[in-house]
Image (spheres, rainbow, N blue to C red):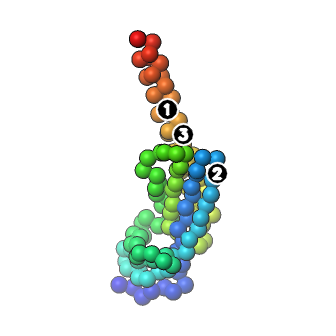
Amino acid sequence: MSRINHTLRFFKVTGELRKDKCEFTIDPWKLLLETQRYYEIRPENGAVKRIYKEKLNTTVVETKQYANGLLCCSAFCTEDRIEDLQRLILNQLQTSIKTYMEDLKLNLVALSRYSSGL
């Protein structure tokens, strides 16, 4: 295990779309332990999380199912990458919306075909 780099700080960047609002939150996380493969980090109040080094700066879609107009993505990063991650999260949210829209259009076509056969 490595010595802890006390100058290294992590942030969880979360982008959330809720109906007609887009909001970002940036929460600091404290480094507890660094190994060759991962970091153990913890928020101000909460449980310890293990972030593998290859997953740092990678967006994660947190919305398992689209409901009530809510979509959410997040990523862990260092302070110098916060703006980059906000852009990546915006792109991920746009991609998710486009995918849902395409699926809904296909559903409309299927309904039209079905109803015309009745």
Of the residues shown, which amino acid type is indicated by label 2?
Answer: Lys
Say whether residue 5 is left or right of residue 90: left
Which residue corresponds to the image point at 44% horizontal and 47% vertical from the top-left?
65
The nearer-to-camera label among 1 and 2 is 2
Residue 15: x and y, percent?
57, 58
Residue 52 versus residue 74 in the image, above or below: below
The mark nearer the N terminus, 3 or 1, is: 3
Give the mark toward the camera: 3 or 1. 1
Whether residue 14 is visible: yes
Q: Is residue 29 above or below residue 65?
A: below
Secondary element at image label 3: helix
Quarter of the image for residue 4 reads bottom left
Closer to the chain start, of discs 3 and 2, is 2
Q: Secondary structure at mark 2?
A: strand
Identify the residue position indicated by label 1 in the image.
104
Q: Amino acid at mark 1?
A: Leu
Tell me the crowding category of disc 3: few under 14, some 14 to 19, or many 20 or more residues within 10 angstroms, Cα based: few
Q: Give the alpha-carbon distance from disc 3 to disc 1, as whole Å.
A: 10 Å
Image quarter (top left, top right, bottom left or bottom right) of the C terminus:
top left
- Image mark for residue 39: none
Q: Tell me: residue 110, above or below residue 45.
A: above
Which residue: 43% across, 64% down?
Answer: 55
Tell me if mark 1 has few (under 14), some (14-19) or many (20+) residues whose alpha carbon lies within 10 angstroms of its own: few
Question: Residue 58, percent across and down?
Answer: 48, 61
Which label's residue is closer to the chain start, 1 or 2? 2
> Which residue shows up at 59% across the image and 68% down it?
26
Q: Which residue is mark 3?
A: 98
Closer to the eye: label 3 or 2: 2
Q: Position of residue 67 (x, y in %)?
A: 48, 45
Relative side of 109 to 83, left or right:
left
Task: Using the numbered discs, state the Cα–Cα distance from disc 3 to disc 2 in whole angstroms.
Answer: 17 Å
Q: Which residue has dot 2 on it? A: 21
